[in-house]
Image (cartoon, rainbow, N blue to C red):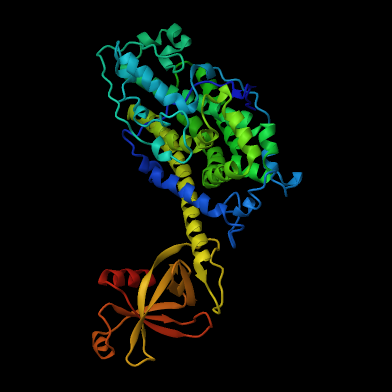
Amino acid sequence: MAHLNCKDGLITKTPHDSMQDGHSVQMQDVFGSPGAMASALRSVGRSLLHMDSVPGLDERETEISSSTFNGEGTEEGAGDSPDEEDQSEEDVPPALFQSKYIDMFPLYQDYLPSLNAALQRARKGALNDLVTCQFLPSLQSPLSSHSPTTEFSSPTTEFSSPTTSCSSTPSPQPVRVNPSCTLWQDLPEVKESGLLNTLTTRELRLQEARFELIGSEASYLRSLGIAVNHFFASKKLRKSLSKRKQHILFSNLRHVMKASESFLMELETLLGANVLISHVEDIVLNHCSTFQAHYVPYVTNMQYQEALVCRLLENNRRFLRAMKKLEGDPVCQRRGLKSFLILPFQRITRLKLIMQNILKLTKPDCGAISSLQQSIEAIHQIVDKCNKGVQRMQEIEQLVQLELRLDFGTVKKVPLIVSGRFLVHEGALRQLTLDERPSSFTDVYLHLFNDLLVISLKKDQHFVVVDHAAFPTHVHVKQLQPNALGPLGLPSDSFLLHLSQNCTGQPTVLILATHTRSDKEVWMKVLM
């Protein structure tokens, strides 16, 4: 079984992360909108952080219930007994695998900026097609901002695309870059093999793209090693946190690192057997099930991490002191904990781009095309599941906020936060009151969920519930005939809402009017 050799908080690994592009593949194809994803993670975390519990939330949908935030501001993290520690984390064996290429690459946070700078220096010499941005499109999508500390709260910055222009010369020649950024052509075994004199330019580009997968994974694993062996393993940090909060902070990061370690070991074994790299797509495909098992819960739970870190820094002096000392250690290279915690999110979104670049450089008639396409689709499915997990967190955030603002009063209360429920549409309408002379309209507010309709009166920032019914079972809408509008003095944007069984179990009928025709069309459509 593959393991890691830990030294000074580092994992003795190799090849670093050369994340692919944004050049031919827009990030929204990978994760929708990275900015929206990041915003969702942050906002949900802040909302759930202040909740003592999330009523009705199915724990299978989220790794960590927000109830784990109880007593968060305590200095010592009291209230947790030793047996509360997540036993699954104890199943991760110690790391022993020793990577061959670890010293050739910087931390994952610094890889792309470092490589970009090296290529810019090389441009002044004999830079060739092999290392132009056209064939290393990942340079268009830097991993981290240029500031010393990468903020966990700014994934949008991570996906920004500064303009990088590279020129090329007709004759392909090996380019020597900074030792911290090694290309396939720079490897001693490659130079000794004589392949650089026999491969075509396209074949050289393909080898570099495949080696980027290996190098980038080594760099990524090196950074994960610091997160786990330096931060997670810190006794002082452990003593400042309860075991529950420690699990919230690091989630299943050790399992993520173990998956990366196993993946890199197989890639390095492939390279060791034959310096001419091939069939990396088969290895990627074989590891996708493991990636899905660990990356989906980690990315889904990320919204808890930032919120907890911020709260601990404000309220836990022991945690603050421990963090300052840990982050000030040279092994971190001026990078904060947040920049390490976000790495799995960045890595899984980049992995697909790396494979797409390999596919782009592979000849159409090559037998590897099918496996490449399958591996890309498998990674896409993982990213899609991560995306859906975060979307579910957004939905939960809406439910949490609404439950705090809904006042059921004397009306039969229904739990708002239940598994699978989400808000479909909401808005203000007017209800016709016929028991008065002359008839008048009362402002009402409707919250339509996928399984429930709530009718209320808005009072400042709260809603006083007056009725509710199961949707769509007991909710029906009907257009009013034009000849019925005049005698009742109804506006043209009126419709009939029939609740066959309301909160008291009785049928009731309401005449509602929207403020605009387009509003009516929307409500008629969602209520049908």
Q: Is residue 273 above or below residue 499?
A: above
Q: Residue at x 42, y 14 (%)?
A: 178
Task: Report the label total.
Answer: 0
Q: Quadrant of residue 410?
A: bottom right
Near-viewer residue (352 or 484): 484
Near-viewer residue (231 or 134): 231
Considering the image in quadrants, where does the N terminus appear? top right
Q: Is residue 477 left or right of residue 231?
A: left
Q: Judge whether residue 498 can be spotted in this image.
A: yes
Q: Residue at x 59, y 37 (%)?
A: 253
Q: Judge whether residue 213 can be spotted in this image.
A: no
Q: Is residue 384 above or below residue 176?
A: below
Q: Is residue 7 above or below residue 86?
A: above
Q: What percent of the width, then of the height, locates residue 436? A: 37, 91
Q: What percent of the width, then of the height, locates residue 159? A: 38, 36
Considering the image in quadrants, where does the C terminus appear? bottom left
